[in-house]
Image (spheres, rainbow, N blue to C red):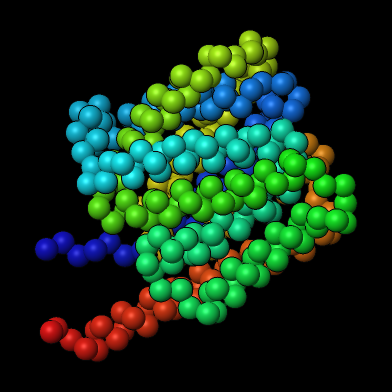
Amino acid sequence: MTAARPDNLARGIAFAVASMFLFAVMDAISRVLTRDLGLAVAQILWVRFVIFFLFAVAIVGPKRFLPSFRSALPRIQLLRAVALIFEIGIFILAFRYLPIGDVHAVAAAAPLVVLALSAAMLRERVTLAIWLAVVAGMVGVLVVMRPGLRDFSWFHAIPVIGALSWGFYQTLVRLVGRRDSADTTLVYTVAVGVALTSCVGPFFWKAPTPAGWGLLLLSGLLGAAAHLALIKAYEACSAPRLQPYGYTLVLWAIAVGFAALGEFPDLWTIAGAAIIVGAGVFALLRERALARSAAARAAAAGPV
């Protein structure tokens, strides 16, 4: 039997952080496409999923693409794909109205949503310490949004809906990951994505300028490149060891927003983001410690 390949942590971190940077640049372009060029969310989704579909065919391989549709949980796969489409659309809509740093400060609460939903949907054990981290994360969201302390509009709630939908999607990913391969999950994502956005996108189409076309295509390519970098990260290192580095997306979003769009979050947003990220990292580290403790107890017990 071939021994498991050891983790290459440095390589995994490099690809994970690069992936977060590419996502941040893609989101900045989404803000320009929606806010400045007035393109519809539906047409941006359509172009992005067409490019993502071609990327997936290349990754999975034409001969393995159709066989990869065999799933132990086809209905959950369909629901997961729809949840992803909805979540991406919600965040693109948020970028029309809010700076990308502000949006990602709230979106950073999504892993905490996953922990809460895992207890309800997957019957996973969640300790009091992790529940307190979830509550702290929600406090951080309130600090970012600060209702009552500024002019509050409905669009300030959009990233909250995005974080909740992203957390729901990630919970479904954990569920299907128990039974289906990564290829099956990827194939369902792109197939459902292309099918649904092709039904909607043409009705909201606004002819882009040449510059708009360039940004549309670049947005899709950056998304594909970001996903490829994330795949490479998980090939190099186990997912639990890389999870905390996903929070670098908040830092990249702030940096790219400032460099490309002249946007910089205020102290309330920075403080709220720090609370959310701190709570999330604590929860992830606590969850990892519990997993190690359970594994150690199982090893000590020996075979039954």
**Residue found at the very far right of the displayed protein:** 150
For the C terminus, the quadrant is bottom left
Residue 264 percent location from the top left of the image: 81, 48
Q: In this view, does 35 lie above or below 7?
A: above
Left or right side of 48 for 179: left
* Residue 44 showing in the rendered view: yes
At 47% from the left edge and 60% from the top edge, which residue is drawn?
Answer: 117
**Between 143 and 216, the one nearer to me in the picture:** 143
**Between 299 and 103, the one nearer to me in the picture:** 103
At 68% from the left edge and 12% from the top edge, which residue is drawn?
Answer: 209
Q: In which quarter of the image is residue 121?
A: bottom left
At 60% from the left edge and 38% from the top edge, which residue is drawn?
Answer: 90
Q: In which quarter of the image is residue 87?
A: top right
For the N terminus, the quadrant is bottom left
Q: Is residue 82 above or below residue 63?
A: below
Residue 152 percent location from the top left of the image: 82, 47
